[in-house]
């Protein structure tokens, strides 16, 4: 099953793309809630390149690594990647009012679909807030 989340960001597509693919930006926006943070991120933005981010609860009670391999890159338009046996596509669609970022990913089987959708949407909302707050 595929899950899709999206948001509209009022910024130029180049800025949105950079914030999504730059480790120093990723560590600032990649969290679903204020009690989580990303402590490290790496990006090798090319087909076959790897990425990873370390997400941790701020109280130190739990953490995990999110990592994968890029399978397709179209600058300012598309990032596709695999993570484990799942895949994800991130589309950047520039329009008159900004950039729509749409993330479509394979659902996992451990958590309810709505919980997964809400978590990924919260991260995407955090991303939009980060981009719009940094001129």
Image (cartoon, grey):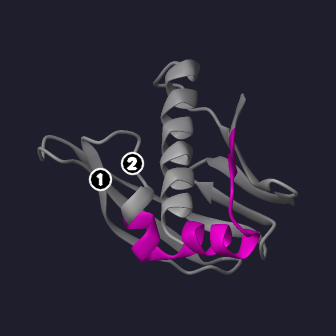
> In the rendered view, would you say 93 is above or below 102?
below
Q: Which mark is residue 37?
A: 1
Question: Going by the image, does 10 lie left or right of 44?
Answer: right
Pointer 1: residues within 10 angstroms few (<14), some, or many (20+)? many
Question: Going by the image, does 36 lie left or right of 15?
Answer: left
> In the rendered view, would you say 32 is above or below 96?
above
Q: Position of residue 9 (x, y in %)?
A: 67, 53
In space, the residues marked 1 and 2 are separated at their CA atoms by 5 Å
State yes or no: discs 1 and 2 in contact (Cβ < 8 Å).
yes
Q: Position of residue 133 (x, y in %)?
A: 49, 61
What residue is shown with label 2? Answer: 31
Q: Position of residue 104 (x, y in %)?
A: 72, 43
> Residue at (77%, 72%) from the top-left corner?
76
Q: Secondary structure at mark 1?
A: strand
> Residue at (51%, 76%) from the top-left corner?
22
Magenta span: predominant SS is helix
Specify the quadrant that holds the N terminus. top right
Pointer 2: residues within 10 angstroms few (<14), some, or many (20+)? many
Q: Earlier in the sequence, mark 1 or mark 2?
A: 2
Specify the quadrant that holds the C terminus. bottom right
Q: Judge by depth and name the residue closer to the eye, 62 or 82.
A: 62
Q: Is residue 69 magenta?
A: no
Instruction: Name which quarter of the figure residue 38 lies in.
Output: bottom left
Q: Which mark is residue 134?
A: none
The magenta-colored residue range is: 6-27
């Amino acid at each position: 099953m595929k899950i899709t989340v999206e948001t509209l960001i009022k910024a130029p597509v180049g800025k949105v793309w950079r914030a999504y693919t730059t480790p120093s930006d990723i560590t600032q926006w990649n969290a679903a809630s204020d009690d989580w943070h990303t402590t490290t991120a790496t990006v090798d933005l090319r087909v076959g390149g790897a990425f990873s981010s370390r997400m941790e609860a701020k109280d130190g009670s739990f953490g995990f690594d999110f990592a994968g391999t890029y399978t397709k890159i179209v600058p300012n338009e598309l990032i596709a990647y695999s993570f484990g046996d799942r895949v994800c596509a991130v589309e950047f669609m520039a329009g008159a009012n900004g950039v729509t970022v749409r993330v479509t990913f394979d659902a996992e089987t451990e958590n309810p679909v709505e919980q997964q959708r809400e978590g990924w949407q919260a991260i995407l909302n955090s991303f939009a807030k980060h981009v719009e707050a940094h001129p």
